[in-house]
Amino acid sequence: MKLDTIRLKLSEAKIFTELYHRHSKPLKRHKFTIGAYDKSKYISPMVIEDDLLGLVTVDTCSSHAWSQRRNHIEIRRLVVKDGCKNVASFLLSKAVTVCFAMGYKAIITYTQPNETGSSLMALGFQAQKFKATTYKDKTFNGLVQWCLTEDFQKNPDFEFTKTNLIKFNQMVEGYSNRKSN
């Protein structure tokens, strides 16, 4: 498979996200969205929605504190069809390249605790913050905040990220096991 990119309109991103994202709704706005498709299947650059393998949507930061900084941007959605190997890493690397080329100094994103973040770590993202919430109805939710800056790209501290992700995932698994008993 030879992956290539295509710029997507917000309306196209909304449809794909609605169909393929596991837990999040489509966004109402974006700075840009990049789609991925298998270039080896096409002679012309015309790609239709059914041919997309995934997309990454970038927008201003959802956190009020981060959004006050003009040089920060957030990867808001990463959506990949099941079974599409390496598409997440491909899309994230393209989004990171574009963001830094546009002059952004920090890229923020979030994952759920059960997501490994391996594509993020491969690009040098650092796990910055772990948040877990237990609700009255005994459901559990959490977020891992990731950050990539030009400095982290040059000298990432993977031990901090790996160690803390392991601790956070053990906490989540421990809670899940107590809940099922």
Image: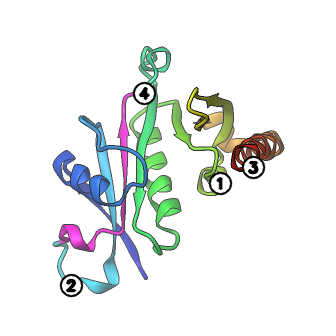
Labels 3, 2: front one:
3
Which of the pair 5/28 is nearer the observer? 28
**Tag 2: residue type?**
Ile
- Give the CA separation, mark 2 to mark 1: 36 Å
Who comes first in sequence, dot 3 or dot 2? 2
Q: Is 7 contained in the magenta span?
A: no
Q: Which residue is mark 2?
A: 43
Q: Is 59 contained in the magenta span?
A: yes
Who comes first in sequence, dot 3 or dot 4? 4
Which of the pair 150/117 is nearer the observer? 117
**Tag 4: residue type?**
Cys
Give the structural element (helix, strand or loop) at label 3: loop
Viewed as shown, does residue 32 lie left or right of 179?
left
x and y, in percent, of residue 11 in the image: 17, 48
Q: Which residue is mark 3?
A: 181
Would you call the spot at circle 2 few (<14 residues within 10 Å), some (14-19), or many (20 or more)? few
Who comes first in sequence, dot 3 or dot 1? 1
What is the magenta range? 47-60
- Give the CA separation, mark 3 to mark 4: 39 Å
Numbered label attached to residue 61: 4
Who comes first in sequence, dot 2 or dot 1? 2
